[in-house]
Amino acid sequence: MKKKNDEKIIFFCNGKKCGKYNKDPKDYLKNKIIEFGLEDKVCVSKMDCQGMCKKAPVVCIQPKDVWKKEVSVKKAKKIFEKHIL
Ligand code: FES
């Protein structure tokens, strides 16, 4: 029997640098979560600067502990398909 998906959290770095670039991918993922009715299973949260500012914006998906750098809307789409659905 397939195990139910555990709750997932998408952390967006909200440090000075990432905060400048994360709006579009964040909006994209929030909209997808609503579109697919995953509000109870997935939440989007913030985290402090992770010291990888050159790779802004930085995203972390838990509990899989997947880290993604330079997350554009295109990358956010891949994240959604691979790690959220
Ligand atoms: S601001 Fe995101 S890693 Fe520093």
Image (cartoon, rainbow, N blue to C red):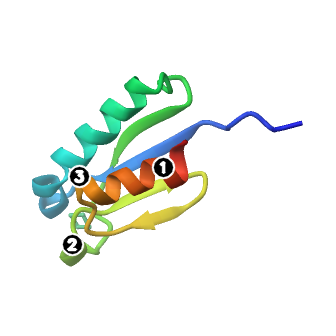
**Residue drawn at x 56%, y 30% as measured from the top left:** 41
**Residue drawn at x 27%, y 40% as measured from the top left:** 28
Q: Are marks 2 and 3 in contact (CB under 8 Å)?
A: no
Q: Are marks 3 and 1 in contact (CB under 8 Å)?
A: no
Q: Is mark 3 within 8 Å of ligand 1?
A: yes
Q: Residue 75: name its quadrant.
A: bottom left
Q: Which mark is residue 14?
A: 3
Helix, strand or loop at mark 1: helix
Q: Compute the Cα span from label 1 to label 2.
A: 25 Å
**Eye-nearest disc, 3 or 1:** 1
Question: Which percent across, then down, holds residue 1?
Answer: 89, 36
Is 78 left or right of 70, judged from the image as shown?
A: right
Q: Compute the Cα span from label 3 to label 1.
A: 23 Å
Residue type highlighted by circle 3: Asn
Residue sitting farthest toward the right: 1
Q: Is mark 2 within 8 Å of ligand 1?
A: yes
In depth, the one of 53 and 71 nearer the eye is 71
Q: Ligand 1 falls in which quarter?
A: bottom left
**Residue drawn at x 43%, y 46% as measured from the top left:** 10
Helix, strand or loop at mark 3: loop
Q: Which mark is residue 53?
A: 2
Q: Compute the Cα span from label 2 to label 3.
A: 10 Å
Q: Label 1: which residue?
A: 81
